[in-house]
Image: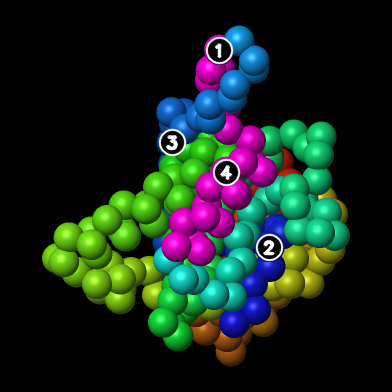
Amino acid sequence: MTVSAFPLAWPQHRPRTAHRRNATFNTKVNNGRYIETKALTVAAARDRLQRELDRLGAKSIVLSTNVELRLDGLPRSGQAEPKDPGVALYFMVKGKPHCLPCDTYSTVADNIAALAAHIEASRKIERLGVADLGEIFAGFVALPPPKHWSEILGVPRTATVATVNDAYRGLAKKRHPDRGGSQELMAELNLARDAAVRDIEGTSP
């Protein structure tokens, strides 16, 4: 399975969160005088997640977000919070692919931290002997991520809404069930157009 770290490759079987909320994830920093509480950065959240993945024994890890990365794989500095702060973690455990997505919170860092907390809690459950990791993660078996809307519509990611709509109308003539297409192809096209308009206009999914 090929998954992109950027932009976000959200799993197609998982619905998006309609109303996000602020989280209480943070980090403690010693400023030399006292312990200060600060908002979690993406880099710090990634470190927290990586520690949990190492303890889990995860392999083939891809953390997919809308945060641009440097060549070394770390977040590029000076970025604004993306309009879509969702994250999707793809990894292998005991030879099986899994995907843990999260867009519950309003920042990328908090959604990454939530994944770390989830994995930590899952390991605790395993230690209690109630279920093993295979059973715990059974509901998170990874499915192929959906194609990006630009690929489906055949337009660049920098396209305007007008360009998207023109491409949609042209493809709809071929994909509509009444024109020799199918309901599945038309549904994929409708979802691609909706996703494109959200991204271009900057509205939440």
- The residue depicted at 49 percent of the width and 76 percent of the height is 92
Whole-angstrom CA distance, mark 4 to mark 2, is: 16 Å
Provide residue 191's location: percent of width, then percent of height: 56, 63
Provide residue 46's location: percent of width, then percent of height: 60, 49
- The residue depicted at 53 percent of the width and 35 percent of the height is 106
Q: Nearer the viewer, mark 3 or mark 4?
A: 4
Dot 4: element: helix
Res 143 visible:
no
Q: Give yes or no for contact between labels 4 and 2 (Cβ–Cβ under 8 Å).
A: no
- Left or right, residue 127 beside residue 18: left
Dot 3 corresponds to which residue?
A: 19
Of the residues shown, which amino acid type is indicated by label 2?
Ala
- Left or right, residue 33 beside residue 163: left
- Left or right, residue 198 beside residue 155: left
Res 20 visible:
yes
| Above or below 177: residue 100 | above
Provide residue 8's location: percent of width, then percent of height: 64, 58
Of the residues shown, which amino acid type is indicated by label 1?
Tyr
- The magenta-colored residue range is 34-55
Dot 2 corresponds to which residue?
A: 5
Dot 1: element: loop
Q: Earlier in the sequence, mark 4 or mark 2?
A: 2
45 magenta-colored: yes
Depth order, front residue of 36/63: 36
Q: Give yes or no for contact between labels 3 and 4 (Cβ–Cβ under 8 Å).
A: no
Provide residue 103's location: percent of width, then percent of height: 49, 46
Return the mark for residue 45: 4
- The residue depicted at 59 percent of the width and 75 percent of the height is 60
Q: Nearer the viewer, mark 3 or mark 1?
A: 1
- Dominant secondary structure of the residues highlighted in magenta in the image: helix
Whole-angstrom CA distance, mark 3 to mark 1, is: 36 Å
